[in-house]
Image: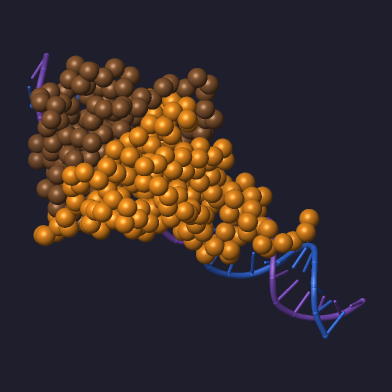
Chain colours: A brown, B orange, C purple, D blue
Amino acid sequence: MNRDAAATRQRILNEAKAHFARHGFDGATVRKIAASAGVAPNLITRYFGGKAGLFRAATAVDLDVAGVVSGPFSSLGDRIAAKVVERWEAADSEDPLLMMLRSAGTSDVAAAALGDFMLQRAAAPLSDYLPAVTGCTPVEAQAQAAAVGSIIMGAVTTRYVLRTGPLAAASRAAVARWLADQIQRLLDPSGVVSLAAAEGSRADLPPVGG
Amino acid sequence: MNRDAAATRQRILNEAKAHFARHGFDGATVRKIAASAGVAPNLITRYFGGKAGLFRAATAVDLDVAGVVSGPFSSLGDRIAAKVVERWEAADSEDPLLMMLRSAGTSDVAAAALGDFMLQRAAAPLSDYLPAVTGCTPVEAQAQAAAVGSIIMGAVTTRYVLRTGPLAAASRAAVARWLADQIQRLLDPSGVVSLAAAEGSRADLPPVGG
DNA sequence: CACCGATGTGTACGGTTGTACACTTCTTTT
DNA sequence: AAAAGAAGTGTACAACCGTACACATCGGTG
């Protein structure tokens, strides 16, 4: 067997994605990841500087939101829903987003990563696009983007994490149709309610440990 | 110091709620919970049969959804949103729902508990109520209830777990107004898309470990 | 007062975790 | 071919986990 650092690193990374996606940051163990990759556990420390570094490397998200958003407004819900379902229904389920979603509750690193993604990679392109098309203000667009992000996150959590209820039982086509409709409802430009920034600071929750 | 089993049990339970809410099921440790309660760790085993039993006892949800749902349809979004914000904005943040939400990603027990709650305690009263008021079918009502549940779950995750973006920065009043509007949009009875149950079974994800 | 069960503690065990250290083995370069 | 360094392994350690067991201690009851 040829020695190939890059290939080994990649193999570890692939297994890490699978394990993190299935078990979350805390639930996954470097020993099992290494075993799956057919490698000694400490290679993870060598290549990624430890478990946290491995998680950071494994959660590099590859997703083109801007490309999905652009197009006619009347079918925007369809496009977003189709992309969401396509993404999450992928067979391998080693998705960085699933990892982050699973781990966000118990790990600061994961929560920050998912928050950044939702804000800058997912919501930003949408709220940049909306004002030009529906004539709403940027602040209103932000509120609508937050709504779309919220329902996607909730639906995805229900179907792929909790895995109960009609959302989990439905076919992917039904979910796509349903989600498209919900998103289009939230995007309706009439009577948009914006999310004014807080004047005072709200009572802060302590940060999550871990 | 008086010996009082019931009081000790309650003290443990209170500390458990705080710890589970802050760290999730995996992140919390019986040792630290016991230490916070000023008690030996194994009393947890004695009183609750172990860590899982303690979690089960700590996540007894007290919430009257039916009472919130009943009332005029035109302000249903307001009522639900107000209840959600009131509940989650509570200062102590030792909420069972928060515990379950944090732990659902990494623990089967927590995922099942949250799924059951969402389905039977939260969605059911709403989808029971809708047909009588909007004339939609029970199946359509289910789909709408799933949508409302999803956006609440996503919004709550964004504001209280991820804690980034406009949803986290906004005042509680603004969040309540915004959420009420989004829910009312999703509840609009025109052109409801239902969630048909799957004909074939979809590619199953493996259950979460833990 | 004497007793005895309820209440709580101390200690310890087996298991798992992440990772540091010293070592071998292969590949490449000189 | 020989040296050198990269690539990977084996072992071990300290910390922590949940919990089982044997023991101490208190409070109500005979």
Where C24 sits versus A131, above or below?
below
* Count of all numbered marks drawn on residues in the image: 0
Query: Which quadrant of the figure has residue B137?
Result: bottom left
Where does residue C26 sit, x and y in percent of width and height?
12, 35
Q: Residue at x 17, y 39 (%)?
A: A180
Q: Is residue B48 visible?
A: yes
Residue C17 picture location, percent across and down? 38, 45
Percent from the top left, x then y, of residue A90?
14, 44
Which residue corresponds to the image point at 48% horizontal and 31% vertical from the top-left?
Answer: B172
Using residue A183 as the reference point, say whether residue B47 is left or right of it.
right
Residue A30 visible: no
Q: Nearer the viewer, residue A157 or A11?
A: A157
- What residue sits 21% from the left and 44% below the top? B190
Between A43 and D24, the one lying in front of the other is D24
Q: Quadrant of the C terminus of chain A?
A: top left
- On the rendered image, what quadrant is the N terminus of chain A found in? top left
Q: Is residue B102 left or right of residue A92?
A: right
Residue lying at 13% horizontally and 30% vertically, measured from the top left: A74
Given residues A59 and B73, the one toward you in this image is: B73
Identify whether B95 is placed above or below A141.
Answer: below
Position of A90 relative to B63 (above/below): above
Image x and y of residue D23, in percent: 70, 67
